[in-house]
């Protein structure tokens, strides 16, 4: 179980919010949905940033990208990369929450990215002469299904049900154990559902955006399978800010913190709001009515006070704004 809340409230000064001066930041999974925004935000704050991923992308310059399949890399390869870049901060955003349909992969594939990668990374970071801060990004699905009306907090029991959720928890617990043993300076950030610009096409949000695009092009009604569930949605840019804050707050070492909006939104409502944000008629998207496996159960809502106490972080982008800007930016 995660530690209890900190004894005193922590507020970030503008200097700390900016990262206390330029740093060298490595983002593993730096071309994914969250990784893209982590890379962009860190650069805007004046940091040197290296995105690490299997495949290059057009929006990240060659000098800021390194090709590596981290899930299958050796400890030596990872350590050499971090040593060469002289990393001050390492963010593990590989297979971060909502980045891919990780739950549709084989158990071996899940173990490679959720467990083996973390073990390799911990070993690599622990052996560096210049010790960076490690932020491991995971998912609130580690807590397992919750009863309607509850809010996830540090005291919530961790009872994952699926292979995906369990392997994610194994990785997070390994990070916390290593940090509490003094082997690494590390923290875990658990994310709820993300929304906002440039989503992964593998996520429900990305699929919904694609469906709305198709309806806008064709003028026809498109059908999407919609889970009968409530979820806590956070704009991906706010999530990136929370992750970077976790990289500079000393009190975050050895702790896990949940980011969230504190609001559980019915997914049907999300579909309706997104359709409206796209300027389409309410009938542009229809539910197929087919049963949908609802990962995490029927209800997810996050207690917002713990992230505020520890990181001085709150979700700042209203859902309607996030949806509108996702439509506008991805249309550009």
Image (tube, helix red, strand yellow):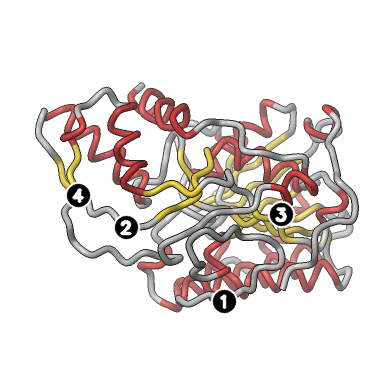
| Residues at discs 2 and 4 in contact (Cβ within 8 Å) | no
Label 1 secondary element = loop
Label annotation for residue 228: 2
How far across and how far down the image is residue 222, in percent?
Answer: 15, 41
Asked whether 22 or 271 is in front, the reply is 271
Q: Residue at x 11, y 30 (%)?
A: 218
Query: Residue shown at 40%/46% (left/top)?
Result: 200
List x then y, in percent, for residue 72.
54, 68
Mark 3 secondary-structure assignment: strand
> Compared to 198, does 123 lie above or below?
below
Which of the two discs, 4 and 1, labels the residue nearer the N terminus? 1
| Residue at the disc numbered 1 | 159
Which mark's residue is nearer the viewer, 3 or 2?
Answer: 2
The tag earlier along the polypeptide, 2 or 1, is 1
Q: Taking the image as drawn, is residue 116 in sight?
A: no
- Please name which of the two marks, 2 or 1, marks the residue nearer to the observer: 2
Screen quadrant of the N terminus? bottom right
Q: Earlier in the sequence, mark 1 or mark 3?
A: 3
Q: Rounded to the nearest whole Å, what is the CA distance between mark 3 and mark 4? A: 38 Å
Image quadrant for the C terminus?
Answer: top left
* Residue 149 in sight from this viewpoint: yes
In terms of image quadrants, where is residue 122?
Answer: bottom right
Disc 3 crowd, CA 10 A, few/some/many (<14, 14-19, 20+) = many
Instruction: Using the rendered view, name the quadrant where residue 104 is placed.
Output: bottom left
Left or right, residue 123 beside residue 276:
right
Going from N to C along the chain, the mark reached first, 3 or 4, is 3
Q: Which residue is mark 4?
A: 287
- Asked whether, in this view, residue 59 is left or right of residue 104, the answer is right
Q: Earlier in the sequence, mark 3 or mark 2?
A: 3
């Amino acid at each position: 179980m995660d530690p209890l809340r900190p004894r005193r409230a922590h507020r970030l000064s503008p200097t700390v919010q900016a990262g206390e001066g330029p740093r060298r930041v490595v983002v593993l999974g730096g071309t994914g949905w969250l990784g893209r925004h982590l890379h962009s935000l860190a650069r805007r704050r004046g940091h040197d940033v290296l995105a690490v991923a299997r495949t290059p992308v057009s929006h990240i310059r060659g000098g800021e990208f390194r090709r590596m399949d981290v899930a299958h890399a050796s400890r030596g390869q990872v350590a050499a990369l971090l040593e060469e870049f002289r990393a001050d901060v390492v963010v593990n955003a590989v297979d971060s929450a909502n980045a891919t349909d990780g739950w549709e992969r084989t158990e071996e594939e899940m173990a490679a990215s959720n467990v083996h990668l973390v073990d390799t990374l911990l070993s690599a970071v622990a052996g560096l002469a210049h010790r960076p801060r490690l932020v491991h990004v995971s998912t609130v699905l580690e807590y397992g299904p919750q009863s309607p009306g509850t809010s996830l907090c540090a005291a919530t029991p961790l009872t994952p049900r699926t292979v995906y959720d369990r392997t994610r928890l194994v990785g997070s617990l390994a990070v916390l154990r290593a940090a509490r043993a003094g082997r690494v300076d590390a923290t875990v950030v658990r994310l709820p559902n993300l929304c906002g610009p440039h989503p992964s096409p593998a996520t429900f949000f990305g699929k919904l955006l694609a469906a709305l695009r198709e309806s806008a092009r064709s003028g026809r009604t498109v059908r999407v399978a919609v889970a009968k569930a409530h979820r806590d949605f956070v704009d991906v840019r706010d999530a990136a800010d929370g992750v970077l804050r976790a990289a500079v707050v000393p009190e975050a070492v050895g702790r896990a913190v949940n980011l969230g909006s504190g609001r559980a939104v019915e997914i049907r409502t999300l579909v309706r709001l997104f359709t409206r944000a796209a300027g389409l008629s309410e009938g542009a998207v229809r539910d197929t009515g087919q049963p949908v496996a609802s990962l995490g159960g029927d209800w997810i809502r996050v207690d917002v006070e713990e992230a505020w106490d520890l990181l001085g972080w709150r979700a700042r982008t209203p859902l309607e704004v996030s949806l509108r800007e996702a439509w506008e930016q991805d249309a550009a």
